[in-house]
Image (cartoon, grey):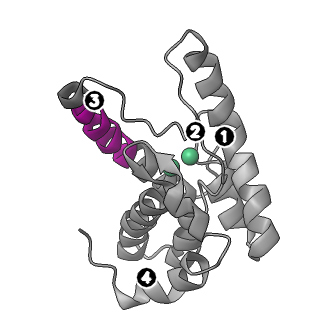
Amino acid sequence: MIYLDNRFMEVALPIIEHQEYQPMKSIKHHDESVFDHSIKVAFYAYQIAYKYGLDWESTIRGALLHDFFLYKFKKTFSFRIITDSIKHAISHPIIAFENASKYFNLNQKEENIIKGHMFPFGFPKSKEAWIVSLVDKYIAVFEYSSNFKKMALRKEPVYNTK
Ligand SMILES: [Fe+2]
Ligand SMILES: [Fe+2]
């Protein structure tokens, strides 16, 4: 459980409470929802950006929207998993940006935070974009390991295939 401070919430709330953002709660990602994952990435990236005097507002907004792709990425345990995963890695930042720009006014830094977060498939062009990309990967490792632990205990995949 993380405590989201007022400074973070002031920037995050207009996005988090937006009706188009709410469906992210029901889209499974790694071991949790895309909603929870994005808030976690945004909060940790914000803490680093704020500490080093960087543009923490763009960091929060870009990070909250970095996975705003709004579809369920189905993982199938077959040889296609590699090609499907690569396709998803390349396309979802572009889709996330297209969705985000429909509902929010984004600056260039926020655009690149979203489009560049899947390095090496995209390229972060600012310190803030690098922070979001690295925090995203760091958190994904924990979420994946938690998911695999559950799979091992249940002896069945925990991916939501609905
Ligand atoms: Fe992503
Ligand atoms: Fe992510």
Residue numbers of the magenta segment: 138-150
Instruction: Residue under label 1, please give it.
Output: 122
Foreground residue, 79 or 54?
79
Element class at badge 4: helix
Look at label 1 and name its amino acid.
Gly
Q: Is residue 45 above or below residue 70?
A: below
Residue 12, horizontal then vertical, whole percent:
52, 80
Foreground residue, 84 or 6?
84
Q: Earlier in the sequence, mark 3 or mark 1?
A: 1
Mark 2–mark 1 contact, CB under 8 Å? yes
Instruction: Residue under label 2, please give it.
Output: 119
Instruction: Residue under label 3, please give it.
Output: 151
Q: Earlier in the sequence, mark 4 or mark 1?
A: 4
Q: Can residue 58 be found in the magenta stretch?
A: no
Q: Is residue 109 above or below residue 133?
A: below
In the rendered image, the quadrant that contains the C terminus is: top right
- Residue 8 numbered tag: 4
Foreground residue, 22 or 37?
22
Look at label 3 and name its amino acid.
Met
